[in-house]
Amino acid sequence: MEQTFVILKPSTIQRSLVGDVLTRFQRKGLFITGIKMMQLDEQILRIHYAHLVDRPFFPMLVNSMTVTPVIVMVLKGKDAVAVVRSMVGATNCRNAAPGTIRGDFGMSGQENIVHASDSPENAVIEINRFFKPEEIFDYPIPTLAATYAPDEIDQ
């Protein structure tokens, strides 16, 4: 099964939406294999958002992402990256479809509730950036057989 990386951004913390967002991921059938709260700083944001550092809005992004701690997590499931991206919706919440996390909980392009890995390769990089190997857990999941067909498990 594939793993993906998600950040519950400060807007999620400030608006008390953590439980709602986590519940959506879990109800979908994704499993949490790593989760922690941490305070981000400009140094890690420059690495994480390296593709945006030269954009004029980057200082605003840093301010937004450092106003409170965030919750970082690793989710596991079949095609987890694509599933989470679909659940999250368009980056600008005003353009995100109803039923997606951003579509239901956001109104901003900047304060857009979550970050989610955009590819399996980036998921691995981002997981390694924010988690030590001993912070990722593999444990028996009693609901696995009720969540997936037998031929979907361990693929």
Image (cartoon, rainbow, N blue to C red):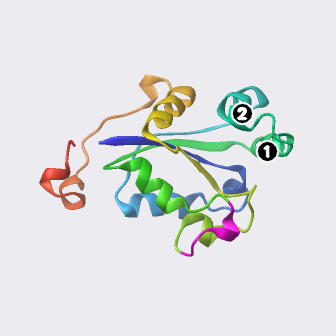
Q: What stretch is highlighted in magenta?
A: 92-98
94 over 119 or under it: above or below: below
Q: Is residue 33 left or right of residue 95?
A: left
Give the crowd class for mark 2: few <14, some 14-19, many >=20 residues within 10 Å: some
Q: Residue at left 42%, top 52%?
A: 82
Residue drawn where x is 49% and y is 62% of the image = 87
Q: Which residue lies furthest to the bottom in this view?
A: 98
Q: What element carries label 2?
A: helix
The tally of labels here is: 2
Q: Name the amino acid type tagged 2.
A: Leu
Q: Nearer the viewer, residue 73 or 52?
A: 52
Discs 2, 1 touching: Cβ within 8 Å: yes
Image position, residue 107 (x, y; %): 73, 68
Comparing 71 with 82, the one in front is 82
Q: In which quarter of the image is residue 148?
A: bottom left
The amino acid marked with disc number 1 is: Leu
Which quadrant, please, contains the C terminus? top left
Label 1 secondary element: helix
* Place of residue 42 in the rendered image (x, y in percent of width and height, measured from the top left): 78, 31
- Residue displayed at 20% across by 42% down: 154
Dot 1, crowdedness within 10 Å: few (<14), some or many (≥20)? some
Tell me residue 33's x, y (percent). Answer: 40, 40
Q: Is residue 91 above or below residue 43?
A: below
Circle number at residue 19: none
- According to the image, label 1 marks what residue? 61
Residue 91 included in the magenta stretch of the image = no
Question: Would residue 8 be found to the left or right of residue 142 on screen?
Answer: right
Q: Which residue is drawn at 18% across and 56% down?
A: 145
User: Quadrant where the N terminus lies?
Assistant: top left
Q: Which mark sits nearer the N-terminus, 2 or 1? A: 2
Q: Residue 45 carries which label?
A: 2
Q: Where is residue 95 in the image (x, y as percent from the top left)?
A: 66, 69
